Amino acid sequence: MSKEELIQLLKDYKENKAKLNIKLKDLKNCRIKLKHLELETNSTTSYGINQDIHSKNKISNKVLDKIEQNDTKRIELQKEIEDLEKTVRKLREKVEAVDDRLTGLKYKEREILTAYYVEGRTAEEIGNKLYFQLFSQTRSPRRIQMIIEEATKKMLKL
């Protein structure tokens, strides 16, 4: 993995994670729909008045129509599930690649790198606010950039 790819993965991390959660919910809903796709037909008794009179223009077969509709729905849902599974696999690979590399960093490096790439904060803001919140000290933007570079190199080695 190159440095540019890693940086792009870090920048897209939050978006990819949100997309992954949404796609997982969609996948779950599709599987539930597929599971509950059943044959629902209406049957009438032949004992009512005028039950033997039918339209002469069209032959109606409600059961067969419903079976065909369920088949087409089932096929569409299975295709949608396959597509969602492919998308989920790709997103999960991206998210897990970043997660695995971030866990290999120390706390300070992880927080600074996450704030810089994932949240889009500036080095000056990180040095003055975030670093102060974490360690009750401030750092110059140049020092923050150095920490970011070191952490990025460390992530590439993993």
Image (cartoon, grey):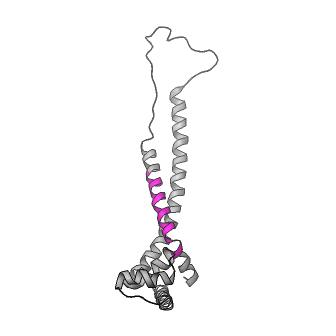
In the rendered structure, the answer to whether residue 84 lies left or right of residue 28 reads: right
In the image, 67 versus 98, the foreground residue is 98
User: Residue at point 36% right, 82% down?
Assistant: 134
Question: Residue 70 at x, y = what percent?
Answer: 51, 38
User: Residue at point 51% right, 11% down?
Assistant: 52
Q: Main secondary structure of the magenta part?
A: helix
> Extreme top residue here?
49
In the image, 8 versus 131, the foreground residue is 131
Work out whether residue 2 can be spotted.
no
Q: Which residues are magenta?
A: 10-28
Work out whether residue 38 can be spotted.
yes
User: Residue at point 45% right, 40% down?
Assistant: 37
In the image, 36 versus 115, the foreground residue is 115
In the rendered structure, the answer to whether residue 20 lies left or right of residue 108 reads: right
In the rendered structure, the answer to whether residue 50 lies left or right of residue 135 reads: right
Question: Residue 98 at x, y = what percent?
Answer: 46, 76
In the image, 1 versus 3, the foreground residue is 3
* Residue 74, placed above or below residue 84: above
In the rendered structure, the answer to whether residue 25 lies left or right of residue 87 reads: left
Q: Is residue 17 magenta?
A: yes
